[in-house]
Image (spheres, rainbow, N blue to C red):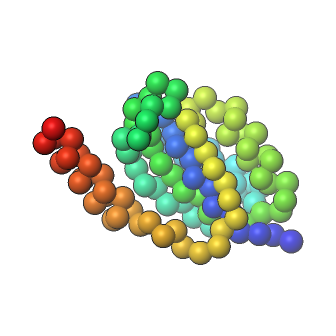
Protein backbone atom coordinates (compact mmCIF):
# COMPACT_ATOMS: atom_id res chain seq x y z
CA UNK A 1 0.00 0.00 0.00
CA UNK A 2 1.37 3.38 -0.99
CA UNK A 3 1.47 6.02 1.69
CA UNK A 4 1.99 9.76 1.47
CA UNK A 5 5.29 11.12 2.83
CA UNK A 6 6.87 14.52 3.23
CA UNK A 7 10.60 14.97 3.30
CA UNK A 8 12.33 18.17 4.42
CA UNK A 9 15.91 18.59 3.23
CA UNK A 10 18.35 21.29 4.28
CA UNK A 11 21.06 21.76 1.68
CA UNK A 12 24.29 23.69 2.38
CA UNK A 13 23.20 27.33 2.00
CA UNK A 14 26.70 28.50 1.04
CA UNK A 15 26.50 26.65 -2.30
CA UNK A 16 25.84 28.60 -5.53
CA UNK A 17 22.21 28.81 -6.68
CA UNK A 18 22.89 26.63 -9.75
CA UNK A 19 24.27 23.85 -7.53
CA UNK A 20 21.30 24.09 -5.15
CA UNK A 21 18.87 23.84 -8.06
CA UNK A 22 20.79 20.87 -9.48
CA UNK A 23 20.70 19.07 -6.09
CA UNK A 24 16.97 19.75 -5.73
CA UNK A 25 16.33 18.33 -9.22
CA UNK A 26 18.42 15.24 -8.35
CA UNK A 27 16.14 14.48 -5.40
CA UNK A 28 13.04 15.11 -7.53
CA UNK A 29 14.31 12.71 -10.24
CA UNK A 30 15.07 10.06 -7.62
CA UNK A 31 11.53 10.38 -6.27
CA UNK A 32 10.01 10.28 -9.77
CA UNK A 33 11.86 7.02 -10.49
CA UNK A 34 11.14 5.33 -7.16
CA UNK A 35 7.80 6.78 -6.01
CA UNK A 36 4.81 8.85 -7.10
CA UNK A 37 6.31 12.33 -6.84
CA UNK A 38 3.72 15.00 -5.99
CA UNK A 39 5.51 18.36 -5.68
CA UNK A 40 8.36 20.36 -4.20
CA UNK A 41 7.79 23.31 -1.92
CA UNK A 42 10.95 25.46 -1.86
CA UNK A 43 11.32 27.49 1.32
CA UNK A 44 14.61 29.05 0.21
CA UNK A 45 17.71 30.11 2.10
CA UNK A 46 17.42 30.62 5.85
CA UNK A 47 19.82 31.37 8.65
CA UNK A 48 20.18 28.28 10.82
CA UNK A 49 19.36 28.50 14.52
CA UNK A 50 22.72 26.85 15.22
CA UNK A 51 25.64 25.80 13.06
CA UNK A 52 25.42 22.43 11.32
CA UNK A 53 28.71 21.07 9.99
CA UNK A 54 30.17 24.59 10.50
CA UNK A 55 27.54 26.12 8.16
CA UNK A 56 25.39 29.09 9.18
CA UNK A 57 22.75 29.01 6.44
CA UNK A 58 20.66 26.35 4.75
CA UNK A 59 18.48 25.98 1.68
CA UNK A 60 15.19 24.32 2.65
CA UNK A 61 13.07 22.12 0.37
CA UNK A 62 9.95 20.10 1.19
CA UNK A 63 9.26 17.11 -1.08
CA UNK A 64 5.82 15.41 -1.12
CA UNK A 65 5.47 11.91 -2.56
CA UNK A 66 3.65 8.57 -2.31
CA UNK A 67 5.63 5.39 -1.93
CA UNK A 68 5.92 1.85 -0.62
CA UNK A 69 7.66 1.00 2.64
CA UNK A 70 11.09 0.52 1.05
CA UNK A 71 11.22 4.08 -0.34
CA UNK A 72 11.99 5.41 3.12
CA UNK A 73 15.21 3.38 3.36
CA UNK A 74 16.28 4.12 -0.23
CA UNK A 75 15.73 7.84 0.27
CA UNK A 76 17.58 7.87 3.60
CA UNK A 77 20.59 6.16 1.98
CA UNK A 78 20.56 8.65 -0.90
CA UNK A 79 20.52 11.57 1.54
CA UNK A 80 23.32 10.10 3.65
CA UNK A 81 25.61 9.80 0.63
CA UNK A 82 25.03 13.40 -0.49
CA UNK A 83 27.65 15.67 1.12
CA UNK A 84 25.66 18.78 0.17
CA UNK A 85 22.77 17.85 2.51
CA UNK A 86 23.16 19.15 6.06
CA UNK A 87 20.00 17.61 7.56
CA UNK A 88 16.93 15.74 6.40
CA UNK A 89 13.74 14.35 7.88
CA UNK A 90 11.07 12.21 6.24
CA UNK A 91 7.72 11.57 7.93
CA UNK A 92 4.26 10.34 7.03
CA UNK A 93 2.20 13.13 5.51
CA UNK A 94 -1.02 13.81 7.36
CA UNK A 95 -2.08 17.29 6.29
CA UNK A 96 -0.80 20.56 4.89
CA UNK A 97 2.16 21.96 6.87
CA UNK A 98 1.10 24.28 9.67
CA UNK A 99 3.80 26.82 8.84
CA UNK A 100 3.62 28.54 5.49
CA UNK A 101 6.37 30.21 3.47
CA UNK A 102 4.84 33.62 4.26
CA UNK A 103 5.02 32.92 7.99
CA UNK A 104 8.64 31.78 7.64
CA UNK A 105 9.44 35.01 5.78
CA UNK A 106 7.82 37.10 8.53
CA UNK A 107 9.70 35.22 11.25
CA UNK A 108 12.96 35.58 9.37
CA UNK A 109 12.36 39.32 8.86
CA UNK A 110 11.56 39.87 12.53
CA UNK A 111 14.66 37.89 13.60
CA UNK A 112 16.85 39.95 11.23
CA UNK A 113 15.46 43.22 12.60
CA UNK A 114 16.02 42.06 16.20
CA UNK A 115 19.64 41.18 15.38
CA UNK A 116 20.14 44.61 13.80
CA UNK A 117 18.97 46.35 16.99
CA UNK A 118 21.55 44.60 19.16
Looking at the image, residue 45 sits to the left or right of residue 22; the answer is: left
Residue 103: x, y in percent?
34, 64
Q: Is residue 82 above or below residue 8?
A: above
Residue 47: x, y in percent?
36, 41
| Residue at horizontal 77 percent and vertical 69 percent from the top | 3
| Residue at horizontal 56 percent and vertical 47 percent from the top | 9
Looking at the image, residue 98 sits to the left or right of residue 66; the answer is: left
Q: Is residue 60 above or below residue 11?
A: below
Looking at the image, residue 5 sits to the left or right of residue 83; the answer is: right
Counting the numbered discs, the total is 0
Q: Is residue 48 above or below residue 95?
A: above
Residue 31, visible in the rendered structure: yes
Q: Which of the 4 quarters of the picture holds residue 92?
A: bottom right
Residue 65, visible in the rendered structure: no
Residue 7: x, y in percent?
62, 55
- Residue found farthest to the left: 117
| Residue at horizontal 86 percent and vertical 71 percent from the top | 1
**Which residue is more in the foreground, 51 or 19?**
51
- Residue found farthest to the bottom: 95
Residue 77: x, y in percent?
76, 39
Q: Is residue 99 above or below residue 31?
A: below
| Residue at horizontal 50 percent and vertical 32 percent from the top | 52
Amino acid sequence: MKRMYESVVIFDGSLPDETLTREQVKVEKFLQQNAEFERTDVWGKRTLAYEIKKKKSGYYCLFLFKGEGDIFEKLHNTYKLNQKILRHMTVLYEKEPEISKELLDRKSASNDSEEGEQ
